[in-house]
Image (tube, grey):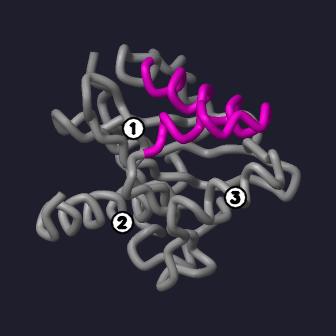
Amino acid sequence: MSPAARRRIAVAATALLLAAGAAPATGGDAPTRVPTVTRSVKLFQERETALAEAIRAGDKSALAKLLSEDFELRAGARAGRPVPRADFLDDVMRSRDGGGDIAAMAVHDLGETAIVSFTQGNRGGALFVVDVWRKGGGDWQLAIRYASPAGDARYAVPGAGAEAPEIPKKY
């Protein structure tokens, strides 16, 4: 992947992180919408579940097939020091912590690349995760994972305190 393509993906992921911190605007007796699961969300829920199951089962081979060769983890607490694929594999095989339930998933399909954001509950609270999946060899592989603790980021993330607009779902 070219440096320019990596920068575009990083900018898109950063925009998703900023947008995810804003709380939905609801008022009084506003009707509650039931989210519709799109084909893309269903596909990536399956990919993310397979990833978590491989970690919990300690199946390094299955997990390795889901990760691109240049995979890296970028955690908010160590933003300038990405975790390379080999170190990530070693750590999750040791901990077997595949995370908790996935919620609030959004998928931005950019053709051969998909940016998938969601919250994931775990023992220590919830994470906000942005995964960059790349289609290679006919299947999707996780190329980059951005993760940070979830919560009220309106004051910590510039722009995240803005009123959240109603965004129509794509069907």
Circle 2 residue: 14
Give SS at disc 1: strand
- Disc 2 residue type? Thr
- What segment is highlighted magenta in the picture? 43-67
Residue 7 figure quarter: bottom left
Q: Amino acid at mark 3?
A: Asp
Q: Which mark is residue 90?
A: 3
Q: Quadrant of the N terminus?
A: bottom left
Instruction: Determine whether the residue tagged by mark 2 lies in a helix, strand or loop.
Output: helix
Q: Amino acid at mark 1?
A: Gln
> Which one is nearer the viewer's eye here, 5 or 160?
5
Quarter assignment of residue 120: top right
Q: Which mark is residue 115?
A: none
Tell how many labels: 3
Disc nearer the start of the sequence (2/3): 2
Q: Secondary structure at mark 3?
A: helix
Q: Which mark is residue 141?
A: 1
